[in-house]
Amino acid sequence: MIFQAIPVSAMDITPRSKPLERGTVLQRTLRVDLHQKYYLYIPRSGGNNAKIFITVHGISRNVSEHAKKFADYAEEFGVVLIAPYFPSDRFPDYQRLGRKGKRADKVLNEIVSEVAQLTGANAKKLYLFGYSGGAQFVHRYMLAYPNHVAKIVLGAPGWYTLPNPALAFPIGIQQSQSLPQVQFNPAQFLHIPACVLVGEKDNQRDAELNKSAKIDKLQGKTRIERGRHWVEEMTYQARAKGLSTTYAFHLLPDSPHSFSISMKRGGMGEKTFDFLFSEG
């Protein structure tokens, strides 16, 4: 799917598509699917040709909190913010793109296309963040759609897809029959810079963590160990192909496995936007 940003001046302005309010978090319904909700923030400077930042919630589905806590950063950096909502009844497997239920990757593509049309934002390359289950979705989206992604930041995923074609998806990148037409090309996705952020206190094997023996053996037993392992593996694979792609891992001070605390005490918002949008 190719996203095409349409300048606001070229849009057909109807009562439904009147210019959207800037500088406030908006709750929207996707035009092609009236059951699909998402949140949108357009900076006061407007959305025409602005970069698009996407933030994806974890299994607590705190989509409103994501949108509101990142809105000030979107304003400061002049980017359009999208926070998609993936309710459990429609998207029981969104973390893995959607092998059952609705395909979260395709729905996100539809949301981005609509936002680009409504705001004139530049959807050629996306900047993505996800927390916990949302971070699982984000890095797998990057693997599946490398041509659409500029950079990603992952907040404390429980586990990862490794860049290993010998392992079946979602543990590795061997093509999955449950995701027809999705192919994983390391030559493309290894160009994309990625940063992993995990709270320094996020070392508990809580109820939400994948505790399978295979994941423990391949990736480690905690989110900290698994994050470091994924960054090391991505770096190794990139260097093996002669690529100098940036992969970073940072511990967030005084932070457990909590989006709100990581934002408040761990500086996750600042670290995310610095990695995604600061030059140099």
Image (cartoon, rainbow, N blue to C red):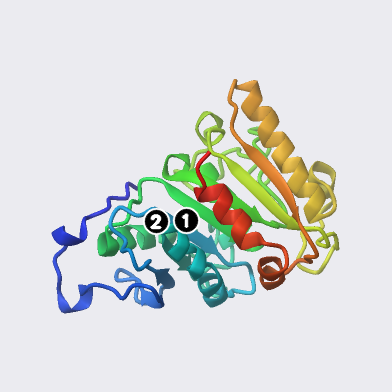
Q: Which mark is residue 132?
A: none
Q: In the image, what residue type sits under mark 2?
A: Asn
Q: Left or right: where does residue 26 sit relative to residue 18? A: right
Q: Residue 252 placed where, x, y %? A: 75, 58
Q: How many marks?
A: 2
- Tell me whether the residue at label 1 lies in contact with that at label 2, contact meaning CB atoms closer than 8 angstroms: yes
Q: In the image, what residue type sits under mark 1?
A: Asp
Q: Is residue 96 visible?
A: no
Q: Is residue 233 visible?
A: yes
Residue at the spot x=60%, y=51% of the render?
153
Q: Residue 41 placed where, x, y %? A: 41, 69
Q: Left or right: where does residue 137 sit relative to residue 161? A: left
Q: Is residue 78 above or below residue 161?
A: below
Q: Secondary structure at mark 2?
A: helix
Q: Is residue 266 above or below residue 246?
A: below
Residue at the spot x=44%, y=72% of the render?
39
Q: Left or right: where does residue 116 sit relative to residue 132? A: left
Residue at the spot x=35%, y=46% of the render?
124
Q: Residues within 10 Å of mark 2 (few under 14, many from 20)?
A: some
Q: CA distance from mark 1 to mark 2?
A: 6 Å
Q: Which residue is mark 2?
A: 109
Q: Residue 70 placed where, x, y %? A: 53, 67
Q: Residue 50 placed where, x, y %? A: 35, 55
Q: Residues within 10 Å of mark 1 (few under 14, many from 20)?
A: some
| Among the 4 quarters of the image, the one containing residue 8 | bottom left
Residue at the spot x=30%, y=58% of the render?
116
Q: Which residue is mark 1?
A: 105
* Nearer-the-camera pick, 134 or 48: 48
Q: Is residue 141 above or below residue 67?
A: above
* Nearer-the-camera pick, 6 or 250: 250
Q: Secondary structure at mark 1?
A: helix
